[in-house]
Structures are given as structure tokens and as C-alpha cells.
């Protein structure tokens, strides 16, 4: 089995790395980070940078050329995502990863033609309207309603934990269309224009220091041309889209960056000869390599036309648990300096390790969470009973 990339794939990685290094200079890092949103880039810079990615042809490298893509294999998308994570670049989110892949899999020809070329150019931002106050881990318990009315559906309800809804032009929305059906039936998927009348967005702070959003839909009209898949059969669309989501979230760039940062710090402190620290770093390097191989395994399955299911859960669990190991190891290495936040005298890495530890707490419950992901692997992968 050959685990290496082809010469063309290596060249593509070098190209993306050079692009990101040139664009995200030290001056950009100083001026374009949002002072009110811990670790986040400014909204307008993120949108402009996404358009630069589109102009360079990096978005949708693995999509058909007919829809503005590069016509390459999904491996190229994984390379791109890995480098974006490693360089902590803005714009790597659902807007250019799993929403367009879900559209490719489940959208109509008209929907693909309408949205995918614009996504490939970096023109559109999306948020995912899944979770609600009473429908998080039990997503099928959602209560938002979509009622047919002529050639439209009328959507009423609330969505919670709506990441970056304030930046979005469109929402990938799950709503109930069959109110008397069993809860896993009677759900449909829609594309909602966020400029539609009747939409309100609230903001609230998180422990990580950035802002989350709740979105309210009050009799919002959605044309039936923006129904994705069949009416009342949205659960299968959601499950397929979540598999694309987990594949995207498994990108290994974050853990590769965390490893290199700790190695550089240990080298600067003259601690690489410390046998205890060396053993810890070797174990972390092994975990990081495992996360990388899992991610590229998923990419290879996609490249061969397969639709991995439980495998994507394995990949994202491996990546996120590894990231949490690095978070804890980073705080341990910094010792008494670990709790110092950005701007504090003596803060290492400008407080990034402390901020990431708080930020990555959501890994344990968002997009399925660790325990639910294990249940998916057990049931769908190993055939164990519920």
C-alpha cells in the first residue's frame, strides 16, 4: 500500500503553502484579527480572502469542472484543507467544504448550476441550520416547521449554535414538513436566502471568547425550487451531509501545526534531550500521523467514488481527540505561564495555547461529540446493537 502523494499532489501542496505564506504575512496577522472575537479573523477580511482562494482556483478542486470545480480527485481538497488549517487561514468552513459536497450529492441540476460556481468563486458564505434548543444530539427532535403555501414553503422556528450565521448569505436548513410522521421522517432540507424577510439573528458570548448565534425564522418564504431532495425525506440528506461534514472536520492540519509548535518551543528551551518530554512528543507525533493517515484514507475512498459513513466518524474522532491531547500537553509544557492570556506580560505564543484549550472544548460535543461519534462507529461500523 502506497501512503505517499503523487508528484502532482506534492506540487499542489507546495503551491498552496506558498500562496498562504505570501498572503498571511506577519503584518496581516497583526491587523486583520478581530480584537472582539478571540482567535477569529475580521469578517470582511475573511470574505475577501475567500474570494482570493476562489480566484486562485483552490475552492472545489475535487468538483466537476462543469460546476466551477477543478475536476481533480478529493485528495486535492484534503491537501488544501490541511494546509489551510496548518496556516490557520480564514474561510475554511462549511461554505467551501461540506455544504457544496452535499449539494453535489443531493441537489438538483438547477441548484448545482445556481450555487456551485458562485461557491467556487468564493462569493457565498453559508451556515448550517440543524441544532435547536431541544434538538442537538437528538437532531430528529427538531421543531422548526416548513409549511407548503403555493409555490413556496413558509418556515417558522429557531436554530441554535448557528456558527457564523452573521456572515452567511444562505442557510442549509432542516425543518419539519410532516408534523404527524415519526420524528426521523417528515423532515426536509432547504436552501434559505438570509436576506429573506422574517429572519433575526441574536448573538451571545462563549467561554472561548468568540460569539455564537441563534437564528429566528418568522414566516420566512422559501421557494420550492430550494427544496433539497424529496419532501419528508430529508433525514437521509442530513446523514449524507454529516458524513461530508465529518470528513471535512477530520483535516489534519491543526494537529500538524500543534506538533510543530511544541517541537519548536522545546528546541528553543533546549529541552529536546529531556527523555520524559521526548517520550511525550514522540507519542503525540504518532497520534498526529495517525490522524493524517485517517484523513487521507477518507479522501482516497471519496476519490474512488465511495461514500464512507462510519469511517468519517473514525477520522474526525481521531483528529479531535489528538488535538485535545496537544491542548493539554501545551499547557503542561508552559507550566506557570500556561494560564496567561493574549496581551499579558510573559504570555507564550500570545496566549494562543490557552485560548485554544478553551476553544477546543466544543470538540467534545459539537458535530456529534466524542460519545455520540463512538456510538456511530459501534452501530454503523461494528454492527453492535443500539
Image (spheres, grey):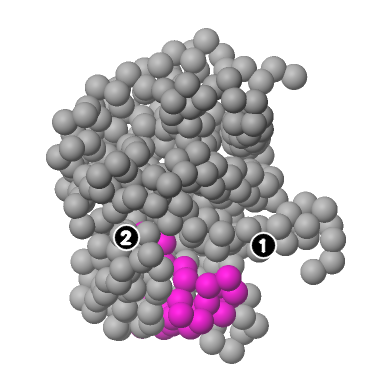
Between residues 158 and 258, which one lies in front from this camera angle? 258
Residue at point 21% right, 66% down?
Answer: 195
Between residues 131 and 171, which one lies in front from this camera angle? 131
In the image, residue 245 lies at what x, y percent?
52, 51
In the image, residue 366 lies at what x, y percent?
51, 61
Q: Quadrant of the N terminus?
A: top right
Residue at point 29% right, 41% down?
Answer: 346
Which numbered disc flags the more N-terminal residue, 2 or 1?
2
Q: Magenta includes 332? A: no
Question: Could you classify mark 1 by the number of other residues whose Cα lies within 10 Å: few (under 14), some (14-19), or many (20 or more)?
Answer: few
Q: Magenta includes 150? A: yes
Q: Quadrant of the C terminus?
A: bottom right
In the image, residue 104 lies at what x, y percent?
48, 46
Circle 1 SS class: helix
Residue at point 52% right, 44% down?
Answer: 332
| The residue stretch that appears in magenta | 127-154
The tag on residue 160 is none
Left or right, 344 with respect to 163, comes to: left
The tag on residue 371 is 1
Question: Could you classify mark 2 by the number of other residues whose Cα lies within 10 Å: few (under 14), some (14-19), or many (20 or more)?
Answer: some
Circle 2 SS class: loop
Q: Which residue is mark 2?
A: 209
Amino acid at each position: 500500500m502506497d501512503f505517499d502523494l503523487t508528484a502532482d499532489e506534492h506540487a499542489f501542496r507546495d503551491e498552496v503553502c506558498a500562496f498562504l505564506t505570501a498572503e498571511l504575512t506577519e503584518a496581516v496577522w497583526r491587523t486583520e484579527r478581530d480584537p472582539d472575537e478571540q482567535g477569529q479573523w475580521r469578517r470582511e477580511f475573511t470574505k475577501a480572502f475567500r474570494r482570493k482562494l476562489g480566484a486562485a482556483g483552490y475552492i472545489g478542486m475535487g468538483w466537476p469542472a462543469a460546476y466551477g470545480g477543478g475536476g481533480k480527485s478529493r485528495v486535492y481538497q484534503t491537501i488544501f484543507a490541511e494546509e489551510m488549517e496548518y496556516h490557520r487561514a480564514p474561510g475554511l468552513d462549511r461554505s467551501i467544504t461540506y455544504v457544496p459536497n452535499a449539494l453535489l450529492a443531493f441537489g438538483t441540476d438547477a441548484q448545482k448550476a445556481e450555487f456551485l460556481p458562485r461557491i467556487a468563486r468564493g462569493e457565498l458564505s453559508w451556515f448550517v441550520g440543524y441544532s435547536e434548543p431541544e434538538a442537538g444530539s437528538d437532531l430528529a427532535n427538531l421543531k422548526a416547521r416548513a409549511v407548503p403555501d403555493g409555490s413556496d414553503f413558509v418556515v417558522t422556528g429557531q436554530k441554535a449554535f448557528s456558527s457564523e450565521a452573521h456572515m452567511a448569505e444562505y442557510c442549509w436548513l432542516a425543518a419539519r414538513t410532516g408534523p404527524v410522521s415519526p420524528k426521523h421522517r417528515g423532515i426536509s432540507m432547504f436552501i434559505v436566502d438570509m436576506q429573506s424577510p422574517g429572519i433575526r439573528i441574536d448573538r451571545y458570548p462563549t467561554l472561548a471568547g468568540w460569539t455564537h448565534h441563534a437564528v429566528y425564522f418568522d414566516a420566512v418564504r422559501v421557494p420550492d425550487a430550494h427544496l433539497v431532495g424529496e419532501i419528508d425525506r430529508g433525514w437521509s440528506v442530513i446523514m449524507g451531509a454529516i458524513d461530508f461534514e465529518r470528513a471535512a472536520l477530520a483535516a489534519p492540519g491543526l494537529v500538524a501545526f500543534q506538533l510543530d509548535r511544541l517541537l519548536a518551543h522545546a528546541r528553543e528551551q533546549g529541552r529536546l534531550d529531556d527523555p520524559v518530554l521526548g517520550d511525550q512528543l514522540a507519542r503525540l507525533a504518532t497520534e498526529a500521523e495517525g490522524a493524517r493517515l485517517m484523513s487521507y484514507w477518507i479522501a482516497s475512498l471519496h476519490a474512488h467514488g465511495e461514500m464512507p459513513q462510519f469511517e468519517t466518524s473514525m477520522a474526525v474522532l481521531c483528529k479531535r481527540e489528538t488535538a485535545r491531547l496537544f491542548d493539554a500537553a501545551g499547557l503542561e509544557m508552559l507550566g506557570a505561564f500556561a494560564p496567561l492570556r493574549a496581551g499579558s506580560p510573559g504570555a507564550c505564543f500570545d496566549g494562543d495555547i490557552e485560548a485554544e484549550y478553551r476553544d477546543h472544548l466544543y470538540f467534545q460535543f459539537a458535530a456529534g461529540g466524542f460519545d455520540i461519534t463512538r456510538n456511530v462507529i459501534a452501530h454503523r461500523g461494528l454492527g453492535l446493537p443500539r
